[in-house]
Amino acid sequence: MKLIIGLGNPGIKFSDTRHNIGFKVLDYLAQKKDIRFRKMFFNSARIVNYKINNLSVKLIKPQSFMNNSGDVISKLMKRYRINIDDLLIVYDDVDLPFGKLRIRKKGSAGTHNGMKSIINSVKSENFSRLRFGIGPKPNNMSMNEYVLGRFDLKEDLVIKNVLENAADAVESIVLNGIDATMNRFNI
């Protein structure tokens, strides 16, 4: 079984912000499969179960605020007895050009507070991640303003194409493994 975690912040206020691109990728996957997220009763998360070629996958959107998502993820890993190799985190990255995807087997949190929370809670940097570039913040904006801001119309058009690639990358990681997927998508 694989746990695919999309990072974002809960609530309508944050639904279309740059920081919620992890949720958006998982929503796209669920919509593509015509399945719906449901609320988990014992964890602060929304979940959908599905299979990719008979492999069990759980798409999960933690409902804690992103900077506290590590606790939820750690509890889910224990509940489902998931080891670190079966965890994939999908999240936004200001250090990548807008619309660029980057897949890694492991790594530091960089400047991302949600990733810092996860690394601290699971006590490891050795898990897969799919980073979705949202581009650097403009000089006239604070980081919070930028990541909690909405995409403009031009960016929205690009995102639709990149969401398809991100969904394909997630499924490729499950089916083909991280190395083959990195070779295919990290160009």
Image: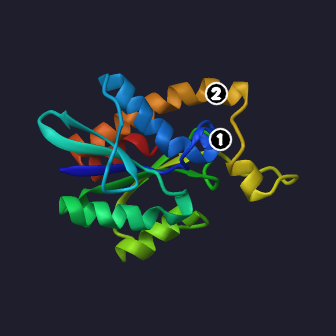
Q: On the picture, is 181 further left or further right than 146?
A: left
Three-letter amino acid code at disc 1?
Lys
Q: Nearer the viewer, mark 1 or mark 2?
A: 1
Q: Earlier in the sequence, mark 1 or mark 2?
A: 1
Measured along the vertical axis of the image, is residue 145 above or below residue 56?
below
Of residue 45 and residue 42, the one placed in the foreground of this image is 42
Secondary structure of the residue carrying tag 1 is: helix
**Distance Cα–Cα, label 1 vs label 2:** 18 Å
Expressed as whole percent of the image width and height from the top left, the position of residue 35 reads 31, 27
User: Which residue does the numbered mark 1 point to in the structure image?
Assistant: 13
Expressed as whole percent of the image width and height from the top left, the position of residue 186 reads 44, 46
Residue shown at 21% from the left, 41% from the top = 175
User: Which residue does the numbered mark 2 point to in the structure image?
Assistant: 156
Can I make out residue 93 in this image? yes
Can I make out residue 105 in this image? no
Expressed as whole percent of the image width and height from the top left, the position of residue 45 reads 39, 50
Measured along the vertical axis of the image, is residue 162 above or below residue 100?
above
> Which color scheme did the rendering employ for the protein?
rainbow
Q: On the picture, is 103 further left or further right than 68?
A: left
